[in-house]
Image: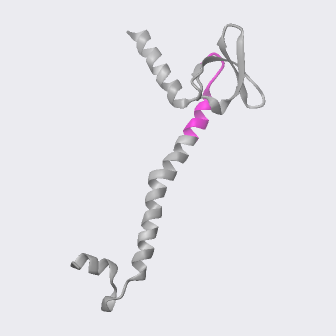
Amino acid sequence: MNSIDTLLMMGEGGKPNPMMNLVFMVGMIAVMYFFMIRPQMKRAKEQKEFSNQNNIGDTIITTAGIYGKIVKANDDGTISVEVDRNTVIKMDRSAISMELTSAFRKKATAEIKA
């Protein structure tokens, strides 16, 4: 074994160091938290804020890919979306896709400027 392996894995007298197992496990949990759990919680918070910011008249895209315009905000946390003339569907606010709607709005503003 080289000297780094010896320092990390072995304690005094060549016996395995149990503290290194604990340090390794804590390190793995920290990596999983900072690279997987925390970003997902941040995205969920941003999605919730985005869906609450949409107002009547905004054009949206749902997670199912349906394009529509918000025509009514209901008291039970749902919205009514007009997908075609005289065709209104009721859906939950969480069904609005933040990524697709943001991309659609950027594309629309870019076309208006051009």
Q: Which image quarter holds the C terminus?
A: top left
Apparent side of residue 114 relative to residue 94 in the rendered image (left or right): left
Q: Quadrant of residue 73?
A: top right
Residue drawn at x 50%, y 26% is 102
Q: Quadrant of residue 87?
A: top right
Residue stretch in magenta: 45-58
Q: Position of residue 86 (x, y in %)?
A: 71, 8
As rendered, which of 95 and 107 lies closer to the eye?
A: 95
Q: Is residue 68 magenta?
A: no
Q: Is residue 35 above or below residue 54?
A: below
Q: Position of residue 109 (x, y in %)?
A: 45, 15
Q: Position of residue 72 (x, y in %)?
A: 72, 19
Residue drawn at x 73%, y 31% is 77
As rendered, which of 110 and 37 lies closer to the eye?
A: 37
Seen as rendered, the residue at the extreme left is 2
Residue drawn at x 53%, y 44% is 42
